[in-house]
Image (tube, rainbow, N blue to C red):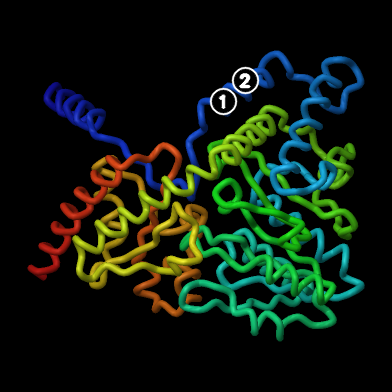
């Protein structure tokens, strides 16, 4: 027993000395210390309910209005077009269900892309059970929406088109301005899930012709459990939550003021630093691509490198696609966190292959074999160097195992 305890102690010491590198920022990001500092007063001194009439409530209500106005400004919206939610999943559910039921007298047809986040696709499955008809517009081999198919899909019964701004797995940036313009011409609402793009690349709801847009905080170094849905004035939408009438009667519940404070601060930092951060992150990603190309002859990239978020790289190595999960675990043992795709998809035990990669034409084997590296604010060139050294070491181990079988 004593030897076992000593061994556990040694293992713990070794683990604590392992260099930790987080390269999974598309799933979530660490809270920036400046964001945490902005949240703290609303977890202690300013704890009032924004709906209360006394000074504890009115002080918080004033802050809430300021945060709402600040976030609206970042996307060129008006303050009363921002509806706070518990995050991107709720915002996406709210957009699809709210538009579907509010506009049922006009039509029961909704169009989404084949590579949407699971919360969009699963909402669509549920809407189908409620009598709505869903069309799934295909994408090309780079993961970009087929605009000609989209034009043909829109008909007199279509009430909504929902296409994400940037994909969470492959980082593909969709032509949302063009899609928005098409929807405006056809008198159809356009919703975009911008949870991955917001804070990384510019977003403008006016110039991009957006009717509804989902955002969240935990992808931009803010807290989990808070986001918002932009709803353009005049859009006919049914509330998702009913109650005391908060959020202009569209989302009744006591507002998460500390989370909203963090959301606003996180967005502010991203906007202020976006110009330099795009260049820095792109440099790190290109260094990563060059390093992988030099080390692995059979290395390939999934998705467009032209229309892509600067922090995203989705790749695989021919012949080793079946060992992706083992490779991820080996990297984790070395203190490196990457992913095999969407974090939310890991909760779905009914499938093991990426629906995004399959929609791009990859076979099920290839669609199970991708690694997603998503860079962030706190990553450095040393992180890239260490990752390249470690992945070469671990893939050589796997290659050695394969050569003997």
Q: Quadrant of residue 115?
A: bottom right
- The answer to whether the residues at label 2 and label 1 have Cβ atoms under 8 Å apart is yes
Residue 349: mark: none
Image quarter for residue 37? top right
* Residue 343 coordinates in the image, percent (x, y): 48, 53
Q: Is residue 60 left or right of residue 221?
A: right
Instruction: Out of 99 and 181, give the one closest to the viewer.
Output: 181
Q: Is 21 rendered above or below residue 89?
A: above
Quadrant of the drawing holding the C terminus = bottom left
What residue is at 45 percent from the left and 39 percent from the top? 377
Q: Secondary structure at mark 1?
A: helix
- Relative to 33, say whether 371 is above or below: below
Q: Residue at x 57, y 28 (%)?
A: 35
- Per the image, the residue denoted by label 1 is 36
Which structural element holds mark 2?
helix
**Residue 5: x percent and y percent?**
18, 24
* Other residues around mark 1 within 10 Å, as few (<14) / some (14–19) / many (≥20): some
Mark 2 burial class by Cα count in 10 Å: few <14, some 14-19, many 20+: some
Instruction: Check residue 40 in the rendering and tell me which mark sits there, or answer none.
Output: 2
């Amino acid at each position: 027993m004593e030897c076992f305890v000593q061994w556990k102690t040694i293992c713990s010491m070794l683990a604590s000395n392992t260099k930790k590198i987080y390269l999974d920022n598309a799933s979530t990001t660490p809270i920036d210390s400046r964001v945490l500092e902005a949240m703290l007063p609303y977890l202690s001194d300013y704890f009032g309910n924004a709906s209360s009439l006394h000074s504890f409530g009115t002080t918080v209500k004033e802050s809430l209005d300021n945060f709402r106005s600040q976030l609206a400004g970042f996307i060129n919206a008006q303050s009363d077009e921002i509806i706070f939610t518990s995050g991107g999943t709720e915002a996406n559910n709210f957009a699809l269900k709210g538009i579907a039921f509010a506009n049922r007298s006009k039509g029961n047809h909704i169009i989404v892309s084949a590579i949407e986040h699971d919360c969009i696709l699963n909402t669509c499955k549920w809407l189908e059970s409620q009598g709505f008809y869903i069309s799934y517009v295909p994408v090309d081999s780079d993961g970009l929406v087929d605009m000609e198919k989209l034009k043909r899909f829109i008909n007199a019964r279509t009430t909504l088109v929902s296409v994400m701004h940037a994909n969470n797995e492959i980082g593909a940036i969709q032509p949302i301005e063009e899609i928005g313009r098409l929807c405006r011409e056809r008198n159809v609402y356009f919703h975009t899930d911008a949870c991955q793009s917001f804070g990384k690349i510019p977003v403008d709801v006016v110039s991009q012709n957006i009717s509804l847009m989902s955002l969240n905080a935990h992808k931009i170094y803010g807290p989990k459990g808070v986001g918002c849905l932009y709803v353009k004035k005049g859009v006919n939408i049914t509330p998702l939550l009913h109650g005391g009438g908060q959020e202009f009667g569209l989302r009744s519940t006591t507002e998460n003021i500390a989370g909203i404070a963090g959301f606003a601060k996180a967005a502010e930092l991203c906007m202020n630093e976006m110009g330099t951060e795009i260049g820095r992150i792109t440099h790190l990603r290109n260094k990563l691509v060059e390093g992988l190309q030099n080390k692995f002859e059979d290395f390939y990239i999934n998705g467009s490198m032209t229309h892509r978020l600067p922090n995203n790289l989705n790749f695989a190595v021919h012949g080793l696609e079946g060992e992706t999960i083992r490779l991820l675990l080996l990297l984790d043992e070395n203190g490196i966190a990457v992913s095999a795709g969407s974090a939310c998809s890991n909760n779905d035990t009914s499938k093991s292959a990426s629906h995004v990669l399959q929609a791009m034409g990859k076979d099920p084997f290839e669609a199970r074999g991708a690694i997603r590296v998503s860079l962030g604010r706190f990553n450095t060139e040393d992180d890239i160097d260490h990752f390249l050294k470690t992945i070469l070491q671990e893939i050589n181990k796997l290659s050695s195992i394969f050569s003997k079988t």
